[in-house]
Image (cartoon, coloured by chain):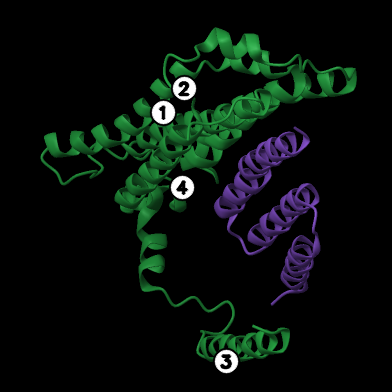
Chain colours: A green, B purple
């Protein structure tokens, strides 16, 4: 295909896209005029019903808990996929061999070392805070979980691969990730045992605006945090093992 | 629309354009993190702090780390 034809085809496609965009924007409700009946109803009823002052978390872990279950398993499946692609064949190499083969990447710069070490505790605390208070103020298990993983990743930046690898042993991460996903699923089964539908909030709402409010909601929140933290760390670990052992090819 | 919201939208447009215009993957990754930061500000300005936090941790931590590891791996392969 010549350059001219390509440009002509591209112009036709762009004109079509522009027409569709304009057509869809024309019928939008005016800016700032939200028209979703479901959202307004949840805004009215979530706090009196569930006693969690952050309505978003109430939706994620309660009203739409089943959607979150699916999202958990999307993350779970994608981490399994990455692990299958990147992890070397079983038995060919154990933990010690990974550490032995890793190049000496200790941080040479004092500034990076000190700044990194100073950054880890506040980041970790902020992550825990985001998870714990996710049902009272903005935050939640996902955001806090990624931040917790990020805090541990700074160990790699500040101290090198060995320190990071010894702090986050892969078997523990595998276990933690599975436990988080299992805890979420089993809390849903708990609702079945209590005689309600799957993932129904079967514990009382508790006092309003505290860490106890929301019944089974904070438990689902912590289960998600565990799963997300471990999943992120597993992803980092798998990629880092590739990074420190560039000579070793992944399985065909 | 208040001026602050307009400014946030313009910043997102600007940052997004710089990501597209960058050709070097490393530069693109860092610019993409800046783009994520402008999106975080946008969500905050439009009063969606939960979404802003999600954007911040995904665009500022998870995505850049994986991209950087992949780029480093590809470069190591090129050097061999």
Q: Residue at x 67, y 23 (%)?
A: A244
Disc 3 on helix, strand or loop?
A: helix
Q: Earlier in the sequence, mark 2 or mark 4?
A: 4
Give SS at disc 4. Answer: loop
Mark number displayed over residue A173: 2
Q: How dense is the environment of label 1, judged by Cα within 10 Å: few (below 14), some, or many (20 and up)?
A: many
Q: Residue at x 36, y 28 (%)?
A: A178
Closer to the observer: label 4 or label 1?
Answer: 1
User: Pointer 1: what residue?
Assistant: A177
The residue singled out by tag 3 in the image is A19
Q: Tell if the residue under mark 3 belongs to the same chain as the one under mark 2.
A: yes
**Chain of residue at mark 4:** A
Which residue position holds label 4?
A53
The answer as to whether the residues below labels 4 and 1 share one chain is: yes
Dots 2, 1 in contact, CB < 8 A: yes
Residue A59 at x, y percent in the picture: 38, 53
């Amino acid at each position: 295909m010549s350059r001219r034809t390509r440009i002509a085809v591209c112009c036709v496609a762009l004109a079509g896209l522009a027409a569709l965009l304009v057509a869809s924007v024309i019928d939008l409700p005016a800016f700032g005029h939200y028209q979703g009946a479901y959202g307004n109803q949840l805004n009215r009823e979530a706090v009196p019903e569930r006693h969690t002052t952050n309505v978003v978390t109430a939706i994620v872990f309660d009203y739409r808990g089943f959607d979150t279950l699916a999202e958990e398993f999307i993350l779970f499946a994608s981490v399994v996929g990455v692990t299958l692609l990147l992890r070397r064949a079983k038995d060919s190499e154990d933990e010690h061999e990974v550490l032995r083969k890793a190049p000496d990447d200790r941080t040479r710069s004092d500034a990076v070392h000190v700044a990194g070490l100073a950054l880890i505790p506040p980041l970790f605390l902020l992550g825990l805070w985001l998870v714990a208070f996710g049902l009272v103020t903005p935050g939640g298990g996902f955001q806090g979980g990624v931040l917790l993983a990020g805090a541990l990743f700074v160990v790699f930046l500040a101290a090198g691969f060995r320190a990071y690898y010894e702090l986050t042993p892969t078997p523990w991460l595998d276990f933690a990730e599975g436990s988080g996903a299992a805890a979420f699923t089993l809390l849903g089964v708990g609702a079945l045992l209590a005689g309600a539908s799957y993932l129904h909030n079967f514990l009382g709402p508790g006092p309003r605006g505290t860490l106890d409010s929301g019944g089974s909601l904070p438990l689902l929140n912590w289960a998600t945090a565990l799963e997300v933290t471990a999943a992120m760390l597993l992803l980092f670990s798998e990629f880092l093992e590739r990074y420190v052992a560039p000579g070793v090819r992944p399985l065909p | 629309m208040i001026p602050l919201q307009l400014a946030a939208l313009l910043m997102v447009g600007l940052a997004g354009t710089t990501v597209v215009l960058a050709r070097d993957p490393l530069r693109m990754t860092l610019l993409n993190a800046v783009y994520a930061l402008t999106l975080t500000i946008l969500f905050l300005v439009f009063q969606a702090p939960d979404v802003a936090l999600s954007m911040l941790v995904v665009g500022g931590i998870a995505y850049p780390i994986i991209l950087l590891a992949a780029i480093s791996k590809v470069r190591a392969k090129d050097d061999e």
